[in-house]
């Protein structure tokens, strides 16, 4: 290997990603939430998506026990939500009125879209665990003209309005 972890992280940082917050409620009623940029589509039939959690995340054991969760896609003005749910500390849900999803998962208000999912499979992903999830329901925002929150090279970016390559 002719590179170190920092070099790999910097190289991968050139690839822009959207930002999601995955939310769930444990069997004990505790609400969980975690910001992630490692999210992608896996399959349309069956409808599967994937995200990953670092093996050293304090809440990983709780996430493994959740049968259902919601993937909340953030809009470009929601960097504050991304920052809030990226913290490892408590208080993430303070002053947030979650919406109960069709399958009982807590949805964040006013996100671009929320996908209610159930756990489908988990796999080893090196220093992360991959969560493959089956989409059960889609909750779209009535304000579909908004742009997504984009993360690249360690910061948030805005898409230029109405421009395509």
Image (cartoon, grey):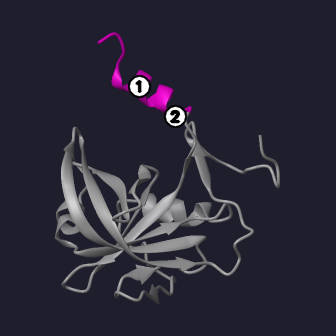
Check residue 9 for magenta coloring. Answer: yes
Task: Estimate the x, y position of residue 14 in percent, counting from the top left.
Answer: 56, 32
Horizontally, is 6 left or right of 14 in the view? left
Above-or-below relation of 7 to 65: above
Q: Residue at x 25, y 86 (%)?
A: 29
Which image quadrant: the N terminus? top left
Tally the numbered discs.
2
Q: Residue at x 22, y 75 (%)?
A: 67
Tag 2 secondary structure: loop
Which numbered tag is attached to residue 19? none
In the image, farthest residue toward the top = 2
How crowded is the residue under tag 2: few (<14 C-alpha within 10 Å), some, or many (20+)?
some
Task: Estimate the x, y position of residue 86 in percent, counting from the top left.
Answer: 44, 58
How crowded is the residue under tag 1: few (<14 C-alpha within 10 Å), some, or many (20+)?
few
Q: Quadrant of residue 105?
A: bottom left
Horizontally, is 2 left or right of 156 in the view? left
Q: Is residue 14 visible?
A: yes
Check residue 58 for magenta coloring. Answer: no
Horizontally, is 150 left or right of 66 in the view? right
Tag 1 secondary structure: helix
For marks 2 and 1 on the same chain, the one whose residue lies earlier in the sequence: 1
Q: Is residue 108 visible?
A: no
Q: Quadrant of residue 141?
A: bottom right
Q: CA distance from mark 2 to mark 1?
A: 8 Å
Q: Residue at x 50, y 87 (%)?
A: 97
Task: Estimate the x, y position of residue 70 in percent, counting from the top left.
Answer: 40, 73
Q: Which residue is mark 1?
A: 8
Which residues, given as a range, are shown in magenta? 1-14
Which image quadrant: the C terminus? top right
Residue in the foreground of this view, choosing between 121 and 98: 121
Q: Which residue is mark 2?
A: 13
Above-or-below relation of 106 to 111: below
């Amino acid at each position: 290997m002719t590179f170190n972890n920092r070099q790999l992280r910097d190289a991968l940082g050139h690839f822009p990603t959207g930002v999601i917050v995955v939310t769930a409620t444990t069997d004990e009623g505790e609400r969980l939430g975690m910001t992630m940029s490692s999210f992608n589509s896996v399959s349309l039939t069956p409808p599967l998506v994937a995200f990953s959690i670092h093996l050293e995340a304090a809440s990983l054991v709780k996430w493994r026990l959740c049968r259902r969760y919601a993937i909340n896609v953030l809009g470009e003005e929601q960097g504050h939500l991304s920052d809030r749910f990226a913290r490892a500390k408590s208080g993430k849900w303070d002053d947030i009125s979650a919406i109960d999803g069709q399958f009982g998962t807590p949805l964040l208000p006013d996100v671009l879209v929320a996908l209610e999912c159930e756990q489908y499979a988990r796999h080893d992903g090196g220093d992360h665990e991959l969560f493959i999830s089956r989409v059960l329901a889609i909750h779209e925002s009535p304000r579909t003209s908004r742009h997504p929150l984009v993360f690249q090279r360690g910061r948030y970016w805005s898409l230029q309005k109405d421009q395509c390559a």
